[in-house]
Image (cartoon, rainbow, N blue to C red):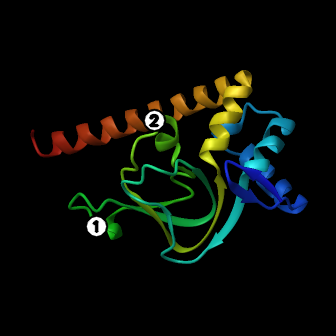
Amino acid sequence: MSQQNNRAFIHDPDQECQIVAHLSKHELFEDLTYEELNQITAFSHMHSLDDGALLIHENDIERFDIYVLCNGSLEVVSNTTEVTSEEVVISKSEKDIFGEIGWLCQNKRSADVRCYGPVEVIEIDGDALRTFVQENPKVGYNIMRRTAIMVSRNLTETNSLLKQVLWANHI
């Protein structure tokens, strides 16, 4: 068992291979080599979770981990708005990474993210990833570049939806 930022991660070769396989398919990590992805497994862990389990807690300012959704669905719920969880369900086909904005900005979490049915996720220790990208500038550049691309795309999609809503309501 190794220790990263006071958090223990069990090193199981089968799990490491599964983590590398899942990460290599995600846009955030697509520029990384097999060796670089394998290094990330040192501070990553695969979890099987039940319905209702919380991955991210709204307003949390202590944990900035990133989660890669492998199987199942998650719902994003904000307790500080009028939105109800039944209206905001995100599944793997729509978004398969969570927590990247909190990790990048180190701001409080804007919503709860919880399991909607059984879920399988990879948890990447945010503090360890931050250290890793600082110590590996090429990897850091690639991850930050991919994060910027993902955030930009999400913002463009949100702007488009907002325009549609405003147009439909003649605002």
Q: Residue beneath label 1, please? A: 84
Q: Position of residue 91 (x, y in %)?
A: 51, 61
Relative to the observer, which residue lies in front, 31 or 8? 8
Q: Which residue lies most toward the right here?
A: 13
Residue under the point 47% across and 40% down:
101
Which quarter of the figure is the N terminus placed in? bottom right
Q: Which mark is residue 12?
A: none
Q: Position of residue 132 (x, y in %)?
A: 71, 34
Using the rendered view, name the quadrant where residue 130 is placed: top right
- Label 1 vs label 2: CA separation? 26 Å
Element marked by disc 2? helix
How dense is the environment of label 2, judged by Cα within 10 Å: few (below 14), some, or many (20 and up)? Answer: few
Using the rendered view, name the quadrant where residue 70 is placed: bottom right
Which quarter of the figure is the C terminus placed in? top left
Query: In screen coordinates, is 159 left or right of 136?
Result: left
Amino acid type of disc 1?
Thr
Amino acid type of disc 2?
Cys
Residue under the point 57% across and 50% down:
65
Q: Which residue lies most toward the front here?
A: 6
Using the rendered view, name the quadrant where residue 45 is placed: bottom right
Residue under the point 47% across and 43% down:
102
Element marked by disc 1? loop
Q: Residue beneath label 2, please? A: 105
Q: Position of residue 87 (x, y in %)?
A: 32, 65
Query: In screen coordinates, is 45 left or right of 163?
Result: right
Above or below for 35 versus 92: above
Residue under the point 68% across and 30% down:
133
Above or below for 42 versus 163: below
The reply to whether discs 1 and 2 touch (Cβ–Cβ < 8 Å) is no
